[in-house]
Image (tube, rainbow, N blue to C red):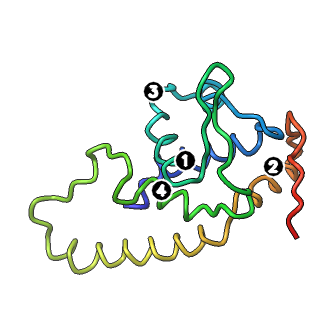
Amino acid sequence: MLLRRDRVMTAVAIVLDVAFHAGRGSTVPAGDIADRLGEARRGIEPVLQALSRAGILGSTRGPKGGYRLGRAARDITLAELAAAITGPDAPRDGDEADPAAPSPLQEKVLRPLWQELEAALLAQLGELTIAELLRRAALAGLRRPTPEALNFAI
């Protein structure tokens, strides 16, 4: 279910952290990401792997390894991040199980309402990109530690 905001928010925070801290041709180590997010590295590894499988993040192994954006920040929507985390290949916590016998109120009222809310949220997330979040960070006075990569796209 999309409104499990813990995983989706972690994915957004990870991708924003990588976009904010990676310079031209550089990567951001998973340990640094975990430290800045206040998370355990092993706790964010499944999210990093799901984002890499989806092509949102690229990774490099080795002592100078880490993560970088898989494509331009303007081309990565928050809806894509949510899909990578909540889709069929996404990491599972086992906390999504529905009750064995939902009540008629749950089945006829709450589930359709939740589906309606999720559809509206996905539509909104589809309008937001990582580039927009970087713009908001700049407006909030946050300075990137490394210069932004040059982009020659027309």
Q: CA distance from mark 1 to mark 2?
A: 17 Å
Q: CA distance from mark 3 to mark 4?
A: 18 Å
Q: Amino acid at mark 3?
A: Arg
Comparing marks 1 and 2, which lies closer to the viewer?
Answer: 1
What is the secondary structure assignment of the residue under circle 2? helix
Comparing marks 2 and 3, which lies closer to the viewer?
Answer: 3
Horizontal side of 69 relative to 91 (left or right) equals: right
What is the secondary structure assignment of the residue under circle 3? helix
Of callouts 4 and 1, the N-terminal one? 1
Comparing marks 2 and 4, which lies closer to the viewer?
Answer: 4
Q: CA distance from mark 4 to mark 1?
A: 9 Å
Q: Amino acid at mark 4?
A: Ala
Crowd band around label 2 with a 10 angstrom C-alpha radius: few (<14), some (14–19), many (20+):
some
Residue for badge 4: 84
Image quadrant assignment for residue 63: top right
Residue for badge 1: 11
Comparing marks 4 and 1, which lies closer to the viewer?
Answer: 4
Residue 121, percent across and down?
Answer: 52, 70
Residue for badge 3: 42
- Say if 103 sits above or below 98 in the image: below
Of callouts 3 and 4, the N-terminal one? 3
Which residue does the image show at 47% across and 61% down from the upper left?
83
Horizontal side of 54 relative to 138 (left or right) equals: left
Q: Amino acid at mark 2?
A: Ala
